[in-house]
């Protein structure tokens, strides 16, 4: 028998350079906002616009970032992922270069918020989409590796900015920063198409199907058959039972990666599948459970000239994802968790000053939390080498234990216990940030990842714009940090609790359907 070959992502190789390329712009992009006041504080004070300007400029940055992410998926389809990434890198560098010559708040708003925000909004989905294409079985490990590089860079970023300000002055520091941010362009150059680096492996699927010897299909299918997909509508129940357990195990082992294990959240078609087929169907990474784009029918096809403007917008931005309850649950949960995390660690130093800590002690405790965050990234990368776990489970565990640790945080006041609980929260913070893009990569098929993640970026930015001022107003009106922290903990719980309920509901529904199938035989 003549054996064929199949192409698989490298799960390494050039993908390691993709991780490095992703870390280059992320270090400056993620560290720029916390260090914005450090770099531009004196300049804004000199022109009479300090606190209010910082809040407005950073909010405008997130706005431009969100809108760029929203359109990224459609731009990828039209111009290619790497081309859009390079455009984002050039815009990011251009914005940083323009900051050297700023004279007013408006100049800074255009250079930093608008141009750099759009650039970074194109860089993020480009990096995650390319990463998703290169890695399947080792996503958590290599994402943890990339995030470790990012965490290491962000730790030293504020220190370097302070030194550059001392050595070169304000505009000299911006010139050096522009040179550093040119690495965003170099990083995007490393985002080569995965087709250039695919591995060619022998394909054993044909032999498995020949050994199984399934009978003729009982339901006709006019579409081209995918040899890697076992459709429950293609074979009868009796014929599907003839597939040996060994062959099923081999077939499902090809999709036993992090991605497939995380696909528990997707809808599983079990109405016509035998119990033996359920595991295979539930682990296959095909868009049949989520997307119907690859299966158009003559009744559903509508010509472009007859489509409404709204339908064009829906297709362009892939807004049909909002009809998926699980996708909406993922977006809302992560959005609430991210806002809660960012706001909590922003207020923590102010709360410690309120408790009577001086600046050296506060800085030491914050540094301990950052060190624990970095150590957790390394630990997660090491753990992923031996244990494959769905990224959404990791994210859920991080959100759940973060809620518990924050309650403990509000009960400690001395330096030792404060340092310990901050280290615990820093350790758990990695479990919220590192698996974030992988949660979407595991749920969405590859052809919808870019649009799905871009839509998330847009929704997350708008959610932060809505609840951010509300929580800030609560803090200003009550002057109560404990109440504010409880409010932020509530938002973190809005991620953990609905996800737990979803797991219970999905697993119960799946068992019910399997039981009904078994009884019908």
Image (spheres, rainbow, N blue to C red):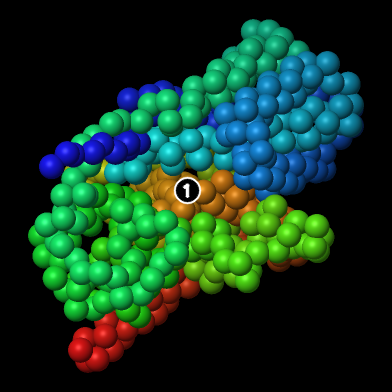
Residue located 50% across and 39% down the image: 128
Q: Quadrant of the N terminus?
A: top left
User: For mark 1, does the 10 Å Cα neighbourhood hold few (<14), some (14 to 19), or many (20 or more) residues?
Assistant: some
Quadrant of residue 397 within the rendered picture: bottom left
Residue at 43 percent of width and 31 percent of height: 194
Q: Quadrant of the C terminus?
A: bottom left
Q: Is residue 273 above or below residue 344?
A: below
- Residue identifier under label 1: 446
Relative horizontal placement of residue 309, taking residue 490 as reference (left or right): right
- Residue 329 against residue 159 in the figure, above or below: below
Point 34% across, 43% down: residue = 136
Nearest the eye: 317 or 104: 317
Q: Is residue 9 above or below residue 503?
A: above
Above or below for 419 versus 228:
above
Q: Nearer the viewer, residue 78 or 354?
A: 78
Q: Is residue 281 visible in this depiction of the protein?
A: yes
Q: Pick whichever, 351 or 194, lies toward us.
A: 194
| Residue 508 percent coordinates (x, y) | 33, 82
Quadrant of residue 146 in the image? top left
The answer, for residue 483, to whether it is visible in the render is: no
In this rendering, would 412 be left or right of 129?
Answer: left
Can you give x and y, in whole percent of width and height, for residue 104 in the image? 89, 26
């Amino acid at each position: 028998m003549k054996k064929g070959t199949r192409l698989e992502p490298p799960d390494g190789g050039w993908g390691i350079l993709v991780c490095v390329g992703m870390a280059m712009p992320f270090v400056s992009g993620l560290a720029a906002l916390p260090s914005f006041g450090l770099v531009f504080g004196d300049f804004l004070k000199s022109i009479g616009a300090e606190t209010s300007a910082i809040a407005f400029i950073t909010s405008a940055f997130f706005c431009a970032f969100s809108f760029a992410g929203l359109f990224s998926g459609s731009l990828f389809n039209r111009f290619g992922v790497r081309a859009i990434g390079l455009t984002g890198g050039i815009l990011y560098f251009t914005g940083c270069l323009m900051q050297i010559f700023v004279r007013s708040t408006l100049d800074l708003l255009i250079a930093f918020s608008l141009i750099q925000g759009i650039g970074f909004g194109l860089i993020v989905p480009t990096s995650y989409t390319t990463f998703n294409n290169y890695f399947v079985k080792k996503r958590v490990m290599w994402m943890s590796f990339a995030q470790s590089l990012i965490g290491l860079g962000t730790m030293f970023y504020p220190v370097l900015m302070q030194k550059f300000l001392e050595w070169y002055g304000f505009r000299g520091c911006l010139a050096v920063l522009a040179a550093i941010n040119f690495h965003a362009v170099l990083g995007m150059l490393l985002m080569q198409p995965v087709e250039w680096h695919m591995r060619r492996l022998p394909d054993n699927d044909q032999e498995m199907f020949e050994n199984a010897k399934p009978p003729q299909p009982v339901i006709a299918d006019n579409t081209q058959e995918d040899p890697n997909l076992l459709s429950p509508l293609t074979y009868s129940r009796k014929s599907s039972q003839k597939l040996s357990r060994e062959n099923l195990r081999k077939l499902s082992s090809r999709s036993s990666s992090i991605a497939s294990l995380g696909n528990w959240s997707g809808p599983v078609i079990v109405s016509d599948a035998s119990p033996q087929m359920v595991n295979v169907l539930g682990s296959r990474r095909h868009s049949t459970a989520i997307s119907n784009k690859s299966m158009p029918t003559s009744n559903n096809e509508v010509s472009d000239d007859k489509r409404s403007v709204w339908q064009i917008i829906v297709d362009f931005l892939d807004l049909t994802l909002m009809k998926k309850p699980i996708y909406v649950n993922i977006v809302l949960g992560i959005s609430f968790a991210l806002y809660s995390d960012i706001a909590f660690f922003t207020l923590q130093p102010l709360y410690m000053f309120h408790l009577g800590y001086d600046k050296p002690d506060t800085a030491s405790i914050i540094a301990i939390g950052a060190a624990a965050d970095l150590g957790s990234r390394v630990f997660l990368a090491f753990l992923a080498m031996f244990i494959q776990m769905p990224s959404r489970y990791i994210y859920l565990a991080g959100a759940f234990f973060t809620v518990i640790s924050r309650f403990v945080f509000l009960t400690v006041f001395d330096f030792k216990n404060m340092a310990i609980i901050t280290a615990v929260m820093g350790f758990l913070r990695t479990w919220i940030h590192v698996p974030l893009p992988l949660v979407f990569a595991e749920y969405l098929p590859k052809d919808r990842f870019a649009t799905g993640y871009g839509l998330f970026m847009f929704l997350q930015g708008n959610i932060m714009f809505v609840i951010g001022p509300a929580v800030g107003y609560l803090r200003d009106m009550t002057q109560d940090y404990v109440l504010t922290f409880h409010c932020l903990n509530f938002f973190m719980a809005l991620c953990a609790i609905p996800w737990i309920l979803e797991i219970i509901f999905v697993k119960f529904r799946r068992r019910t359907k399997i039981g009904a199938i078994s009884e019908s035989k």
